[in-house]
Amino acid sequence: MKVKVMYFARYRELLGIDAERLEGDFKVLDDVRQALAGKGGHYAVLAEQNLMCARNEELCRLDEPLEEGDEIAFFPPVTGG
Amino acid sequence: MAVRVQEAAFDPGAEVNAMHAANVGVGAVVGFVGYVRDFNDGREVAGMFLEHYPGMTEKALAKIVVEAEGRWPLLKVEVLHRIGALEPGEPIVFVGVASAHRQAAFDACNFIMDYLKTRAPFWKKENTQQGPRWVEGKQSDQDAAGRWD
């Protein structure tokens, strides 16, 4: 399955990229997070407890099922307002 | 309902006045304006940059407004949030709610801000004398949003 992964704010800065394409045997969003966090280095930030995520521009939980071509985003807690 | 995410500054007074807009059924308008402060979490703040997730941010705000409209009888709702570079004293956010009676407008405005703070993808990066820093999410904001569950 191919997905697009986007990063925002502190995660984007730390990783040095705002998006990347990934291919793998992903069932739920957490599979993508674990695959990335397992790469080590700055990707370890994706193991943060308060990480937030979205699938196709909607907030979701880590157990959200994925489909081919999904746009996933990982970001730290939001701080608008 | 209108949701606007923009770099441009806005006039809070004009926004509040526009909430009535000749609708004589409106008996109450509640307007919330959030401003950039010059001090936060122990440091002087010289300015900040607001990052967002283009596309999702607008959708997330619209979803919050729809939820508010489902909970209270509202006549008009406006949410305006700025992005980009901001200086202390500048307005960041405006939430305006119009209804026939005050309680719905007060409650809905409060609800929209609590959900915006915890569900709309915006991130603040402050410029301080000790260097730039990302603002961290607060548990008190999560608790405030939780009371509407």
Image (spheres, rainbow, N blue to C red):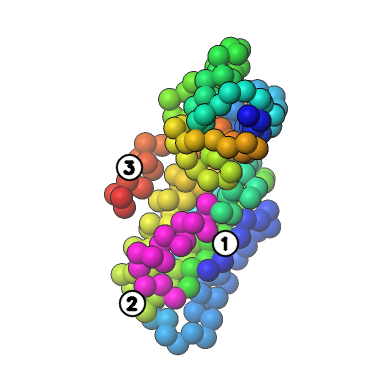
Quarter holding residue B2: bottom right
Which disc is residue B143 wearing?
3
Q: Residue at x 44, y 32 (%)?
A: A63
Q: Is residue A4 above or below residue B87?
A: above
Magenta stretch in the rendered image = B60-75
Q: Are marks 2 and 3 in contact (CB under 8 Å)?
A: no
Q: Earlier in the sequence, mark 3 or mark 1?
A: 1
Query: Per the image, is B61 magenta?
Result: yes
Q: Does residue A53 appear left or right of residue B74 in this picture? A: right
- Residue receiving disc 1: B3
Q: Where does the N terminus of chain A fall, quadrant-wise?
A: top right
- Residue B9 percent coordinates (x, y): 65, 58
Q: Amino acid at mark 3?
A: Asp
- Residue receiving disc 2: B101
What element does badge 2 sit on? Answer: loop
How far, Cα to Cα, is label 3 from label 1? 25 Å
Q: Amino acid at mark 1?
A: Val
Q: Earlier in the sequence, mark 2 or mark 3?
A: 2
Q: Is residue A57 above or below residue B13?
A: above
